[in-house]
Image (cartoon, rainbow, N blue to C red):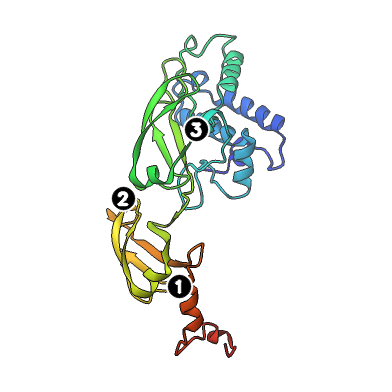
Amino acid sequence: MRDPYDILGVAKTASEKEIKAAYRKLAKEFHPDLNPGKKGIEERFKEISSAYALLSDPDKRRRFDAGEIDAAGQERAPRGAYYRDFADGMGGAGFYAQEGSASPEDLEDLLSSLFGGRSAAGAGMKARGADVSYTLRISFLDAAKGVSKSITMPDGRTLSLQIPEGAYDRQTLRLKGQGGPGYGGGPAGDAFVELHVEPHHYFTRKDNDVHLELPISLKEAVLGAKVDVPTVHGPVSMNVPAGSNTGTTLRLKDKGIYDPRSKTRGHQYVKFKVVLPKVIDPALKAFVESWQPKEDKPRSNMGGSA
């Protein structure tokens, strides 16, 4: 798609009023109903409407100028399509118009000026409804395992949304035909649901791998033990090798996040953290006081003698 400023014939410093005036002038000139049978008119009109939809939205215009999205409103970064800044609403949801068509108010205003106050249907014009975006907060485990959620749209409709296994933060799901209503019998727009994955209190995700810091006791670290380890799929048994130290990391194969593209799972990495008891047992204290280790230089790699 060409640069939206070039399409509307305005400078990058143009004001909101100048952009709207340029759009109205071009829309009247290239409206399909005023140019019956002319080749390419409909595509030109769509191009003008799409350019105006981007530049009339202050946030989209800012992000386009900053190079964050392209002229079609798509993310330039590879992290995911349809990324948007979001506005909080009830239940953590935010709705706003998206690219693809002018806002309903601007379109009705334009149609009124073109056809003497007649509606889009009366003028014989069909137009696609506006897209809407919705933000949905979900838990870390719901994203990892997949879940079905019910969401309430601005018009009160309740829709069922299937969140796929392995969903990631800022991923956008599309609900076709669930956006704003069309004009004059035109198709409805789409609804885009952007997922906001809440952090977990002990799991962290890196790509498709899950990382976990697991506390172990001094006895388990010294003598070794079999312990239960939480994973996103449920607890599993793991052997703690004798002599494990804080920072020792083991891998649980295929216990990470499912990747639908490669149809494989990541792994879970378990890093041990040796934790002393809150109250030191007198027997342990007496043993340590009398203990004469053959090697006890934990800071030798720091250049000291201790």
**Residue 189 marker:** none
Mark 1: which amino acid?
Ala
| Image location (x, y in percent) of residue 2 | 54, 43
Residue at the disc numbered 1: 283
- Decide: is 283 above or below 174: below
The answer to whether residue 234 is visible is yes
Looking at the picture, tell me which residue is in the foreground, 137 or 303. 303
Q: Residue at x 45, y 48 (%)?
A: 80
Q: Nearer the viewer, residue 203 or 226?
A: 226
Q: Which of marks 1 and 2 is in front?
A: 1
Q: How crowded is mark 1: few (under 14 residues within 10 Å), some or many (20 or more)?
A: few
The spot of residue 279 in percent (x, y) is 51, 63
- Picture layout, residue 5 above or below residue 226: above
Q: How far apart are the alpha carbons under marks 1 and 2?
A: 39 Å
- Kindly indicate whether the residue at mark 1 contacts the one at mark 3 (C-beta within 8 angstroms): no
Tell me the residue at 41%/60% (across/down). 211
Image point (67%, 27%), residue name = 21
What amino acid type is highlighted by mark number 3?
Ser
Residue 163 placement: quadrant: top left
Q: In which quarter of the image is the C terminus?
A: bottom right
On residue 133, the disc is 3
Relative to 216, does residue 173 appear above or below in the rendering?
Answer: above
* Label 3 to label 2: alpha-carbon separation: 31 Å
Label 2: which secondary element: loop
Question: Is 31 left or right of 216, judged from the image as shown?
Answer: right
Secondary structure at numbered mark 1: helix
Q: Which amino acid does label 2 sit on?
A: His
| Residue annotated with mark 2 | 233
The x and y percentages for residue 304 are 60, 88
